[in-house]
Amino acid sequence: MVTTYDEYLRTFRHSFIIKRPIERVWDFYTDVKHLEKITPDKIDLKIINTTNQRITLGQEIWISGK
């Protein structure tokens, strides 16, 4: 589902079940470098800079992509 708030900001929501310990899943999804792994190849996502290697409240991540 894609919710458009304006022409520049979009929110993507998706849910699924992963049969792994929550700690392992949390570690994977809160590691900034994994954004490139979970993003579809056609977007060609590249992380340019980040204020923290772990995704946290208020963090800034500079990315590029298609």
Image (spheres, rainbow, N blue to C red):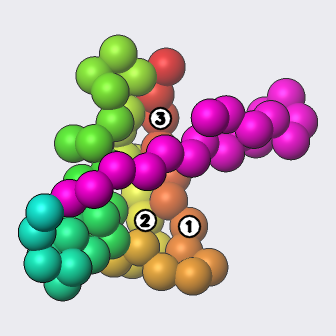
Task: Name the foreground residue: 23 vs 30.
Answer: 23
Label 1 belongs to which residue?
60
Disc 1 element: loop
Distance in Å between CA atoms under marks 3 and 1: 13 Å
- Give x and y (percent) for residue 3: 75, 38
Q: Residues within 10 Å of mark 1 (few under 14, many from 20)?
A: few
Q: Is residue 65 above or below residue 30?
A: above
Label 2 belongs to which residue?
50
Distance in Å between CA atoms under marks 2 and 3: 12 Å
Instruction: Identify the amino acid type marked 3.
Output: Ser
| Residue 43 sits in quarter | top left
Instruction: Name the dominant secondary structure of the magenta segment.
Output: loop
Write the start and end of the magenta stretch as one range.
Answer: 1-18
- Asked whether residue 33 is in view, the answer is no
Instruction: Identify the amino acid type marked 2.
Output: Thr
- Give x and y (percent) for residue 16: 34, 50
- Give x and y (percent) for residue 26: 27, 75
- Decide: marks 1, 2 in contact (CB < 8 A)? yes
Disc 2 element: strand
Instruction: Identify the amino acid type marked 1.
Output: Glu
Task: Name the foreground residue: 16 vs 9.
Answer: 16
Label 3 belongs to which residue?
64
Q: Say whether disc 2 or disc 3 marks the residue closer to the N-terminus.
A: 2
